[in-house]
Amino acid sequence: MLNELDPLLHSQLRLSIMSLLVSLEEAEFVYLKEKTKASAGNLSLQLDKLKEAGYVEVIKTFKNNYPLTKCKITKKGIKAFEKYINDIKGYLHLE
C-alpha cells in the first residue's frame, strides 16, 4: 500500500523551499526568493505555513538597519522531508 503524501510538502513552492533548506544551515529570505522565483508575498505565506507546522524556523533580525529574515529547517522538518522523499520513491517503484 502506498503512503499518503504530506499535503504540506506536496506544494511545489513549499517543496522547493524545503529542498533548499535541507542542504543549508540557514538561508536568507532574499536567497529563497531568488532561487524559487516566487513573489515576496507568496514566499512569505508559504514560509508561514511551514513555520506553523514546525518544519522551519524563521529568524527576523536587522543588518545595517535593514530587516533581515533568515530561515532554517528544523529537525521535525528534516524528518518530514525525508519521509516525503521515501514516500515518493514508493510511488516510483510500483510493479
Image (cartoon, rainbow, N blue to C red):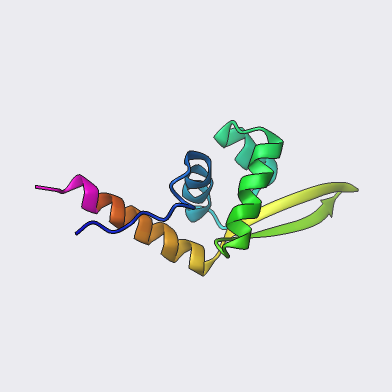
* Percent x, y of residue 95: 8, 47
Tell me which corner region of the image, top left, top right, bottom left or bottom right, holds residue 29: top right
In this picture, residue 59 sits left or right of residue 22: right
Number of numbered discs overlaid on the protein picture: 0
Does residue 26 appear in the picture of this structure?
A: no
In this picture, residue 25 sits left or right of residue 58: left
Q: Residue at x 37, y 56 (%)?
A: 84
Query: Considering depth in this image, is 47 or 71 the residue closer to the camera?
Result: 47
Q: Residue at x 57, y 62 (%)?
A: 53
Query: Considering depth in this image, is 52 or 60 the residue closer to the camera?
Result: 52
- Where 26 falls versus 32 (above or below)? below
- Where 65 falls versus 34 (above or below)? below
Query: Considering depth in this image, is 6 or 36 the residue closer to the camera?
Result: 6
Magenta span of residues: 90-95
Q: Quadrant of the N terminus?
A: bottom left
Tell me which corner region of the image, top left, top right, bottom left or bottom right, holds residue 35: top right
Q: Name the residue at the bottom extreme.
A: 75
Residue 40 on the magenta segment = no
Q: Name the residue at the left extreme.
A: 95
* Percent x, y of residue 9: 46, 51
In this picture, residue 95 sits left or right of residue 85: left
Q: Residue at x 25, y 51 (%)?
A: 89
Does residue 4 appear in the picture of this structure?
A: yes
- Where 65 falls versus 82 (above or below)? above
* Percent x, y of residue 36: 56, 35
* Percent x, y of residue 47: 63, 50
Q: Residue at x 52, y 46 (%)?
A: 14
